[in-house]
Amino acid sequence: MTWSTRQLAELAGTTLKTVRHYHKLGLLEEPERAPSGYKRYDVQHLVRLMGIRRLTDLGVPLSDIPTVAAAGARSTEILRALDAELAANIERQQHMRRQLAAILQDGASLDLPADFGAAAATLPRAQQDLLVAYSSVLTPTAMSVIRDQYTHPRDEVAEEFEHLAADAPEDVRRRLAAHLAAEVRAQWADHSFITDLDAASRRNGKLTRSVVTQALITFYNEAQLDVLRHLHALLEQEEADRGADGDGRDGKGEQDHSGDPDPHRVTPGATG
């Protein structure tokens, strides 16, 4: 009692093409042929084919099947490595499901970086794009600081800055800068590393500054950029005044940024 290739494939729940592929790889021995030239498979071929199918269903690569089938020490190593890979894939998929749940249930925006949730979903599109750009260069810790800013209700001034018109008058710009300066000082007190963009970055300094600079110029209008310039000037003046008072911060120590040409050094997202 023997079977044709097609019958063998049907018994094993696979295809004729797959059986021929296994022959080509040397995983399945060629059977004897009948006088007519047709292959004649027996139960040993069926058992072997079922074993190959079992291992492929478990995710074992075809190239590792002979080693795993031999059931030696190397076989155990391969299976343990496969198990670790599957565990990592499961964790990645669970993480993806949590993000999808936030999008579907909490109204989180698809445009925002992962883990921002619904907190920043109501931001103007330009602000959301700004956060996406920052996520390409800032460390997870720095992004978490920015994210935490959006977990609390934004005050009226922050909302005003986010929706500030490009032709906003000078007095409005200066008022916003003065208010935001207090917020930035509080951030510095809680997260000292954000006074240094290099410390908050996971890329080299030049690349990080190019991303942040282009993002600010692209996604903020002229009035918002002017607010940041005023904000930078206020903070620099405060540091200079403290240095002049002889408190050890004379523009040469750790907190000196007077030579920094970037007004956004106060930390990306400080205006949130």
Image (spheres, grey):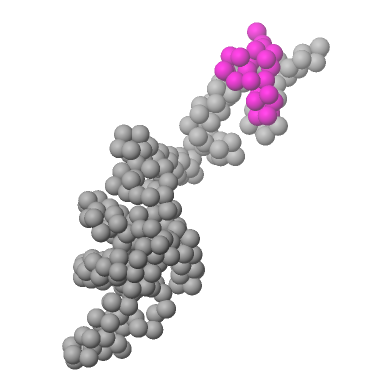
Residue 266: tell me if it is visible.
no
Q: Residue furthest right?
A: 36
Q: Residue at x 28, y 77 (%)?
A: 234
In this rendering, is residue 154 above or below 204? above
Q: Quadrant of the C terminus?
A: bottom left
Tell me: 203 left or right of 251.
right
User: In which quarter of the view is residue 249 placed?
Assistant: bottom left
At a point 41% along the width and 49% down the height, the residue shown is: 125
The residue nearer to you, when weighing 90 against 74, is 90
Count numbered badges in the picture. Answer: 0
- Residue 53 covered by magenta stretch: no
Query: Is 70 placed left or right of 27 in the picture?
Result: left
Q: Position of residue 22 (x, y in %)?
A: 65, 29
Q: Residue at x 59, y 23 (%)?
A: 49
> Picture coordinates of residue 97 (x, y %)?
37, 37
Quadrant containing the N terminus is: top right
82, 101: nearer the viewer: 101
Residue 129 position within the rendered picture, expressed as x and y whole percent measured from the top left? 43, 53
Q: Main secondary structure of the magenta part?
A: helix
Q: Looking at the image, can residue 15 be seen? A: yes
Q: Is residue 179 left or right of residue 219?
A: left
> Does 128 appear above or below 37?
below
Q: Which residues are magenta?
A: 1-23
Frontmost residue, 94 versus 54: 94
Give the quarter of the image for residue 141.
bottom left
- Taking the spot 67% from the left edge, 34% from the top edge, the residue there is 25
Whole-percent x, y for residue 247 in the image: 18, 88
